[in-house]
Amino acid sequence: MDVDEALRRIIMAAGVVFVLGGAVLIFVDDPFPWGLTVIIAPGLLALLFAALTVRGRLQGEIVETVMPDPERPPDNERPGDEVDRMLYEMTVLRQGVQENREHLEERMERLGVAVIQDRRDCSPTEAERVLQSGEWTDDEDAAAFFQSETSAVDEAGFANALTGGRSDIDTFAYQFRAAVEELLRVGEIPAQELEFDSGPDSALGRVLQRLGLRSAGGDDEGDEGIQANWNTADSSIESFDTDEPFEDVSLHRTNRWLGVTAFALFAVGAGIVTYSPGLMMAGTVGVAYTIYGRITAVPATDQLTVERELETEDAEPGEEVEVLVTVTNESGSMLPDLRLVDAVPDSFIVTDGCPRLHTALRSGASATFSYKVRVERGEHQWPLLCVARDFSGGAERTSLITPEAELTVTPSLKVTNKVPVRAQTTMYSGDINTRQGGPGLEFHSVRDYQNGDPMNRINWKKLAQTGELATVDFRQEKAATVTLLFDTRQSSYVAAEPGEPHAVDHSVHAASDVFGALYDQGNLVGVAAFDTVPCWFSAGAGSEHLEKARMLFAQHPALSPAPPERQNVEGQYIDPMTHVLRRLQSNSQIFLFTPLADDYAMEVASRLDSQGHLVTVLSPDVTTDRSVGQRLTRAERTARVRHLRQRGIRVIDWDTDEQLRLSIDRAKARWA
């Protein structure tokens, strides 16, 4: 038993004694048979206990389970959020100024060199010189950002700070924004007009609210913001992962009656000290409520039966599924306050209805609620969160009940696009034309007859004219070996808007289409992913191989809708591509699915290309341009796309607002 619990029991016992004492004082003729001091001492003691109770109430809080919010879509990180966060920390919080400034300067220098190289077709050294000299722009603020630390602009900024003008940090932020806008213009990167306003209704203000750095009303204090994962951040339940059909999470007192206890002790103590029977009787009311809150039965939820009916148990990603939940109280007692929330998986989006219910259930009664969700790949079996309270609300039991219903969501690997494959072949026949003669459809050459040549390839016309046997060769068609490679690092789990699929989801959806198309063309197709969770599925063919690929897209943790938990070993770095390079065949083509959110993804494509692999990058574009950080990230991604294309690497720049087929058609026209 802890100290607080012991103190509460002492206070309760003292309260009962004081109530009995007050009742005695009302009915006795001589209220002071033992002397005034003996009577006043319990009153003073009651006042002391009342003060301690008030202190405990002020220092503590009402302990009630915070319910999750499954209706709110998952709020994944946006490309550029980290830049906006750094600027806010520098300019408003005045934290991490040096580290954030160095990081932003390094990123801007890389982007500036890439843009100047692309526009002027010069070397990196020349591009850096142009950037430092300022001759690349007429905007003085943008040019000043890339000047050396001893430039006149910096000296002027320091002077302004001394004279009460703009500080050096504010000057840096202003020049940073100007440089980003000018690089967008010089690099001919399309973007909307942006007003650099940090008010609560501005684009930057909305970004800061989402990052948890500003409240919706513009107040920067006391707001924890919106976190990324509703079931672990917004709820007091640490985790909804359970393998048990029933799990008791917690049983606790809510401390809801502490204020009443303090009032009761104060009234009783003051009544004794002042010899006021009426005040003492008023305190007895509070004591009665406190005792009632302590002696009421704790509700039990182990006799609740939960049935979850699914519209279908085998769905495809993106399909809407209706869910009906029925809860029955099979215990012999009533549940006066029952709160139910279906812990919908994070990757699901509630599209209709409400996955929660607040009700009271008598013995044998049932309650139902229904909703619709847009499902995502995987095998899903999720619990129902039950929070039951007694009549007084003083005790609360939290449980997780998991029904037997299970939903399996797997891609169909349907063929909706004709995916181009380059002329790198294996011994298996397929759709790729080669330079070799042999069996096929397209004429290749005529050669002398050799023993064993099939009769259907003999040139009968030449035999009739010359009497010599000859064999016709056609252009052979062979299968390509293709590996679909996914970038599933943390930086790839970014989305444009709340509730929209993140880049990994877009990649897996596109890859399921690409896999089906390549398989249908007769190619050998495999799957791999690079991150801390190894993923390798060797290229192959056949119906069994196709079914295994479907299940891999749905179940492998490396392709999960949620990023896998990272286990970083301090002081140790493991290249995410290590396990892929060990198994990758030398003749395998690569379809790399990545949002190109950082330079590492670009380096992976370049490394594979330099090793002789034919690389095609399919990059879903989830960047936006409503804040300076988002605009910087969009410019960086555009620079990476241009760099890869300049190296001769094919890039399908996929605007996720359009169908993939349109982006593939535009890419094929460019390659032609």
Image (cartoon, grey):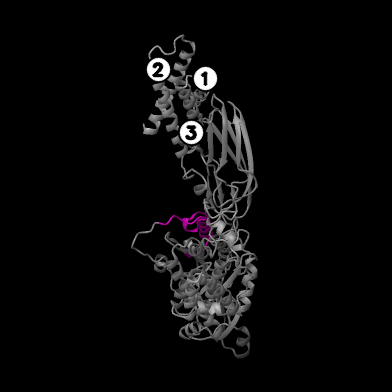
Contact? badges 2 and 1 (CB < 8 Å):
no
- Residue type at mark 3? Asn
Q: Which residue type carries mark 2?
A: Leu
Q: Residue 56, percent across and down?
A: 44, 35
**Percent from the top left, x then y, of residue 180?**
55, 73
Tell me the mark number nearer the camera, choosing from 2 and 3.
Answer: 2
Quadrant of image for the C terminus? bottom right
Q: Nearer the viewer, mark 2 or mark 1?
A: 2
Q: Earlier in the sequence, mark 2 or mark 1?
A: 2
Secondary-structure class at tag 2: helix
User: Considering depth in this image, is 331 or 22 the residue closer to the camera?
Assistant: 22
Q: Is residue 63 above or below residue 597?
A: above
Instruction: Single out the mark in the foreground, 1 or 3.
Output: 1
Q: Which of the 4 quarters of the picture holds residue 42? A: top left
Q: Secondary structure at mark 1?
A: helix
**Dot 3: what SS?**
loop
Q: Residue tagged by mark 2?
A: 36
Q: Which residue is mark 1?
A: 281
Disc 1/disc 3 C-alpha distance (Å): 23 Å
Q: Position of residue 601 (x, y in %)?
A: 48, 69
Q: CA distance from mark 2 to mark 3?
A: 35 Å
User: Which stretch did the figure color magenta?
Assistant: 537-566
Say which quadrant the N terminus sits in.
top left
